[in-house]
Image: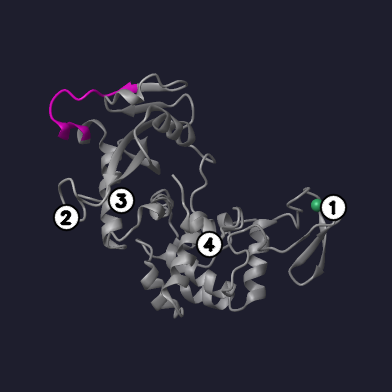
Amino acid sequence: MTEDYPRTLLELERRFSDEPLCRAYLFALRWPQGFVCPVCGAGGLAIRRDLWRCIQCGRETSVMAGTIFQDTNLPLTVWFRAMWQVTSQKNGVSALGLQRVLGLGNYKTAWTLLHKLRRAMVRPGRDRLNGVVEVDETYWGAEESGVHGRQTVAKALIIVAAQADGGGIGRIRLKHIADTDRSTLHGFIGQAIEPGSTVVTDGLQAYREMEGYIHDRQVQKRQPADAEHLLPRVHRVIALLKRWLLGTHQGAIAHEYLQDYLDEFTFRFNRRKSASRGKLFYRLAQQAVDVSPVPFDSLVHHKL
Ligand SMILES: [Zn+2]
């Protein structure tokens, strides 16, 4: 399917004015060559509106089954407007902002909707970074809240990978991690970066003995502030991330949801040079029908 998406809010409102129009769009994204059974891969027949039966195994499937839209109580017209709000604005939208603009009855509905969309934003392991990639960790939480000392809120640890694109930054990957153990750091690198790439880190011991990569270890010789010069790309990304978390979301993020915010930041950052905002809408809708359903329970029990 050629990339087909609305360019403006008016176009979105006109095109996706009812449920069948939204479903037809999702169908074309999910099954561009026609219905494919998610169980056995065979074709199928429409048995009634939005329900297909596999000609081989008999399984009945709707376009929303197995996607983030499964079991939703909200109309797709609302989902489509939410996807537009998230993708059309440079910094996205907070749950409160979304509740207001869509006229949703309560905050939790807006909050859940945003988190489900965030789960569709990054697909780990699908397209790993390559070439020269800087990797470093940062803390989120204590210093930003303006509280210092031992008895402060626990800090969250985030690992950042930033691909070099000439002197600038290409794509990025971010992950909320539990510790800086060797297995944690190496696990992230394996998930985020193609083997054979050059990985640039600071002198932290736990990064050593990296298998399958060229390790460019930048050992700090002078001040801790040197890290910003040795790994300029990751530090630029960290500064932008913190500004976004503090700005759009006022820093009010519980640790168990931090990964969702990191995914949203990554989604937008990696498409920041996209000429059209509608293209981000298209990508999000496409990924939304290409992920597993997210029951509310898995949103609130997010594990590291
Ligand atoms: Zn089948």
Locate residue 179, reporting x and y percent. 35, 36
**Disc 1 residue type (three-letter):** Cys
**Disc 2 residue type (three-letter):** Gly
First in sequence: mark 4 vs mark 2: 2
Q: Nearer the viewer, mark 1 or mark 2?
A: 2
In this picture, residue 131 sits left or right of residue 293: left
**Residue picked out by circle 2:** 146
Label 2 crowd (10 A; few <14 / some 14-19 / many >=20): few
First in sequence: mark 1 vs mark 2: 1
Range of the magenta residues?
216-227
The answer to whether mark 1 and mark 2 are in CB contact below 8 A is no
**Residue picked out by circle 4:** 296
- The disc placed on residue 57 is 1
Locate residue 108, reporting x and y percent. 44, 71
- Measure how far apart labels 4 and 2 are at the Cα level: 32 Å
Measuring 20% from the left and 33% from the top, which residue is drawn there? Answer: 229
Q: Nearer the viewer, mark 1 or mark 4?
A: 4
First in sequence: mark 3 vs mark 4: 3
- Measure how far apart labels 2 and 3 are at the Cα level: 17 Å
Mark 1 sits near ligand 1, with its Cβ under 8 Å away = yes
First in sequence: mark 1 vs mark 4: 1
Total numbered labels: 4
**Disc 3 residue type (three-letter):** Leu
Label 1 crowd (10 A; few <14 / some 14-19 / many >=20): some
The answer to whether mark 1 and mark 4 are in CB contact below 8 A is no
In this picture, residue 266 sits left or right of residue 299: left
Q: Nearer the viewer, mark 1 or mark 3?
A: 1
The answer to whether mark 2 and mark 3 are in CB contact below 8 A is no
**Residue picked out by circle 3:** 241
